[in-house]
């Protein structure tokens, strides 16, 4: 059974940093690209960042480029999101999601975690 | 950045009725368009990928069509469990933008 478990969320002041983690199990982690998607309270989905199976391809939404860094450790079956210079508008539930297909190209997301809540407030 | 515009924002229908949801892209996304369903308190669920392919376990009443810039998700006969929010998503050049969502509510 595929499982994605996010952690690392919490309350943080504007301008500070936070690191999210996603622990994956139930599939061959290093075969698939992975992504972070967020959802502000009562709002829609926003793709944040994605990383290919070998970290060779990485993408970011314009809203987080230069502030967030995605990474993965295939030996630990883990995905990370380093979030710096946090703003109030970064407040959201952050989901980890898995690509449907293996390979180098980005694919739709067939499995999602339950999310970790990040609240940016003074 | 490619922008996806979904319409209508809200669709009020009764069980058994047909639902037609639209997603328009600001530029061509070829067939790289997916549809997701999200219910309150739950993570999204993949319904359709590459415009017209049903994901694993998705009932046949869900179908997708379109290419280029105009796409449609059709639910042929609404079941009570289909009332939810639906999002389209495109993937190109390692960017995965979502539409703003269409809420399908019970009339």
Image: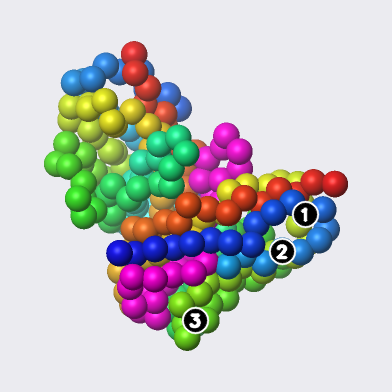
Q: Which secondary structure lies at badge 1?
A: strand
Q: Earlier in the sequence, mark 1 or mark 2?
A: 1
The residue positioned 48% from the left and 62% from the top of the image is A5
Q: Nearer the viewer, residue B67 or A101?
A: A101
Task: Report whether A109 appears left or right of B1.
Answer: left
Q: Considering only vertical position in the picture, is A70 above or below B78?
A: below
How far apart marks 3 and 1 lie (CA) works out to: 26 Å
Disc 1 crowd rating (10 Å Cα; few below 14, some 14-19, many 20+) is: some
Q: Residue B95: give x, y in percent of width and height.
A: 49, 61
- Residue positioned 52% across, 72% down in the render: A79
Q: Where residue B69 is drawn, which disc sits there?
A: none
The part of the chain drawn in magenta is A22-46
- Secondary element at tag 2: strand
Q: Is residue A51 above or below residue B66?
A: below
Same subunit: marks 3 and 1: yes
Q: Label 1: chain?
A: A
Dot placed on the residue nearer the N-terminal end, 3 or 2: 2
- List the residue tagged with mark 3: A76
Query: What number of labels is visible?
Result: 3
Q: Quadrant of the N terminus of chain A?
A: bottom left
Q: Is residue A27 magenta?
A: yes
Residue bearing mark 1:
A12
Give the chain of mark 2. Answer: A
Question: Circle 2 sits on which residue?
Answer: A18
Tell me the residue at 42%/56% (across/down): A112
Q: Both on one chain, marks 1 and 2?
A: yes
Image coordinates of residue A3 in percent, x first then y, are 39, 63
């Amino acid at each position: 059974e595929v499982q994605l478990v996010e952690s690392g969320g919490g309350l943080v002041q504007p301008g500070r940093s936070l690191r999210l983690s996603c622990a994956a199990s139930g599939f061959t982690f290093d075969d698939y690209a992975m992504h972070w998607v967020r959802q502000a309270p009562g709002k829609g989905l926003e793709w944040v960042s994605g990383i290919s199976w070998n970290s060779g391809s990485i993408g970011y939404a314009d809203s987080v480029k230069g502030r967030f860094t995605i990474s993965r450790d295939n030996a630990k079956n883990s995905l990370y999101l380093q979030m710096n210079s946090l703003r109030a508008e970064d407040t959201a539930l952050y989901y980890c999601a898995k690509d449907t297909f293996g390979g180098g190209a980005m694919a739709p997301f067939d499995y999602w975690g339950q999310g970790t809540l990040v609240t940016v407030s003074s | 950045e490619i922008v996806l515009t979904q319409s209508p924002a809200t669709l009020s229908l009764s069980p058994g009725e047909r639902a037609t949801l639209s997603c328009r892209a600001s530029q061509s996304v070829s067939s790289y368009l997916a549809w997701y369903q999200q219910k309150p308190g739950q993570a999204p669920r993949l319904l359709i990928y590459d415009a017209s392919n049903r994901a694993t376990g998705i009932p046949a009443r869900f179908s997708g069509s379109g290419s280029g810039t105009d796409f449609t998700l059709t639910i042929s006969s609404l079941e009570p469990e289909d009332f939810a929010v639906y999002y389209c998503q495109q993937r190109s050049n390692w960017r995965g933008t979502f539409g703003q969502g269409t809420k399908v509510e019970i009339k």
